[in-house]
Amino acid sequence: MAALVGALLAAVGLVIMSAACFFPAQLSWLMFVRYPLAMLGGGINSYGILAFMWLMPDDQNFVASLASGVQSLSDMLALVAVGLSSCCGVFIGEFFLLLSVISVFAGIFGYRKVPSADVVNSLAAVALSQGESLESCEAFAQSEDGDGFMAKEFSSVKQSWVLMKQHAGANGMLLVFSTVYMLSVMYPMQHMYFYYQVLFNNNDTATELVNIFAVIYGIGGFVCSLIGGKLCDRLGIQKFTLAVAGCSAVLSCCLPFANFTLQIVAQAVMLLGYTLYIIIVNRFAMLYAPPHLFGTFSGVQMTFISVGMLAGMSAVSTSVAFVSATGISSPGGNT
């Protein structure tokens, strides 16, 4: 059901995007609605992939990495849109409409092929050897907190919060690690073009590097996710986390140098660190939450991580603005 609902929400967001492109003077304000809606739908839809983790219990990290890999590959659609516009004159509004139709068909396919929650819970019970029957999973879905959808969701959130408090030390370390690590990767990724402008003092070089990253992100992100998932299955979460943390250290060593080749290496490391980190978060949720709380538990975690990242990025941006305002310069002469 998540695959279908997510795909339909994404389709609606894409239709709104198309309308805003066809009638920009009247509907440009819809762009503030369509993007969050399409992103929300895509995020929900990706959970359909995670349902297969308990069909392949020996390759759970590999399955979880598919969600991240597909997301990276889907970002290549921006380049597809540019290519179709350049070679075939396809209007961006028409491209969004085509994507919405494909999204609907993908949702229907997912609804028919993705295992239901009952099937996933029963398979998970067998894989975990907990003796948890299908009836107990159904009993959870009909908990005393209410029969409505929102009541069940609030119940899941409360149970996830209880689980986080029960394992406060592990969850606290994950949240701190996630916030700091994602800042080290996401901040340079989001400010890439402006950083290259200052580093190389050349707009053409900055543009070329950003275009290269667009290609690396789509193809490289997909490949890194698949390889990373298998690697985590083989190494285990402890060694894998150390390897991922090493990506941040390598990135810090590459970023300061105004060398074109070295910056491409930095982009590859940046992408590798981002895609492999998602595997860690998914694995953590598998270890600390029962199957019927996996989605909610990981969602609660990501909420805290997102708030931490927002606070961290605001602090970094404020510090950068302060340094620029006071005229403090780097050794190379750039502010």
Image (cartoon, rainbow, N blue to C red):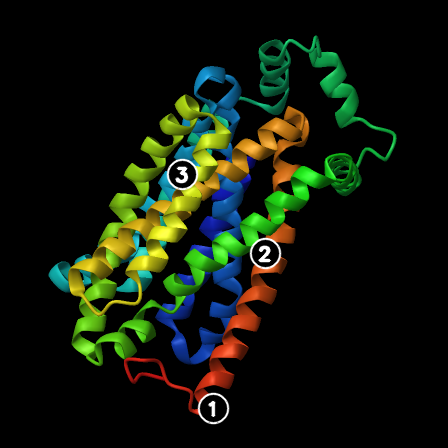
Mark 1–mark 3 CB contact (< 8 Å):
no
The reply to whether residue 1 is in sight is: no
Horizontally, residue 313 falls left or right of residue 203, namely right
Q: Which mark is residue 325?
A: 1
Mark 3–mark 2 CB contact (< 8 Å):
no
Q: Which residue is mark 2?
A: 306
Local secondary structure at mark 2: helix
Look at 55% across and 40% down and name the residue there. 5
Res. 65 image quadrant: top left
Q: Position of residue 90 (x, y in %)?
A: 21, 61
Look at 58% across and 12% down and name the residue there. 127
Local secondary structure at mark 3: helix
**Which of the two residues, 157 or 230, is positioned nearer the viewer here?**
230
Q: Position of residue 177 (x, y in %)?
A: 56, 48
The amino acid on which the numbered mark 2 sits, given as a three-letter code, is Ser
Calculate the distance from the C-alpha at mark 1 to the C-alpha at mark 2.
Answer: 28 Å
Look at 37% across and 28% down and name the residue there. 231
The amino acid on which the numbered mark 1 sits, given as a three-letter code, is Ala
Q: Position of residue 211 (x, y in %)?
A: 22, 63
Q: Which mark is residue 243?
A: 3
**Earlier sequence position, callout 1 versus callout 2:** 2
**Earlier sequence position, callout 3 versus callout 2:** 3
Calculate the distance from the C-alpha at mark 1 to the C-alpha at mark 3.
Answer: 38 Å
